[in-house]
Image: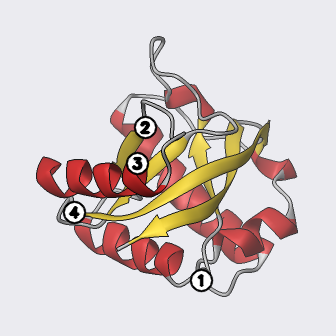
Amino acid sequence: MSNDSITQMWEEFKKMNPNAPKSYEAWAFGDSKEMADELAALVIDGTKTATASNFLLYEENEPLPYVGLHNIILDGDGNAVAIAETTSVEIVPFDEVSAEHAYLEGEGDRTLKDWRDAHEEFFKKEFKAVGQEFHNKIPVVCERFEVIHKK
């Protein structure tokens, strides 16, 4: 991960926003360089304004996203490409994630069916790595965000 680009982007943002919070999270989407690049590009162009994560895989000491959280979005090489502020967080069962949320995630054809197919596959892979089973009632962290700064 290129910490220089993260620090540089945050310092640039703070100069323009003196009341910026002291902390932020820096992370990339997905589980591969290609996915991180593809989803970061969707964030930069404004297509992707939401994300979903597997609530059950948050570590005990790992904080959940919260409204007002500043996230530095990274590309597949770990370079900072944008800062997004979390605007809402909701935890819902997998089978109750809304069509609106699926659309806001901006992936695939943006339908709920496509979202469910892609996320079921992704969550199954995550669960397999820790010896757990996927089911349609797993809690999903549905997060919405707004890009507030980009390269």
The label nearer to you, 3 versus 4, is: 3
Residue picked out by circle 1: 108
- Ranked by sequence position, the earlier of labels 3 and 4 is 3
Instruction: Determine contact: label 1, label 3, CB under 8 Å.
Output: no
Q: Position of residue 30 (x, y in %)?
A: 40, 58
The amino acid type found where label 2 is placed reads Tyr
Tell which tag, 1 or 3, sits nearer the viewer: 3
Label 1 with label 2: CB-CB less than 8 Å: no
Res. 32 image quadrant = bottom left
- Splitting the image into 4 quarters, where does residue 16 fall? bottom left
Q: Tell me if residue 1 can be seen.
A: no
In percent of the image, x 52 and y 59: which residue is there? 121
Residue that numbered label 3 is attached to: 14
Along the polypeptide, which appears first: circle 1 or circle 3? 3
User: Which residue is disc 2 drawn over?
Assistant: 24
How is the structure coloured here? secondary structure
Q: Which residue is mark 4?
A: 79
Q: Residues within 10 Å of mark 4 (few under 14, many from 20)?
A: many
Quadrant, the C terminus: bottom left
| Residue drawn at 19 percent across, 58 percent down | 5
Query: For the residue labelled by badge 1, is the local secondary structure a helix, a strand or a loop?
Result: loop
As displayed, is residue 34 above or below residue 11? below
Kind of residue at disc 4: Asn
Measuring 41% from the left and 39% from the top, which residue is drawn there? Answer: 25
Residue type (three-letter) at the residue carrying disc 3: Lys
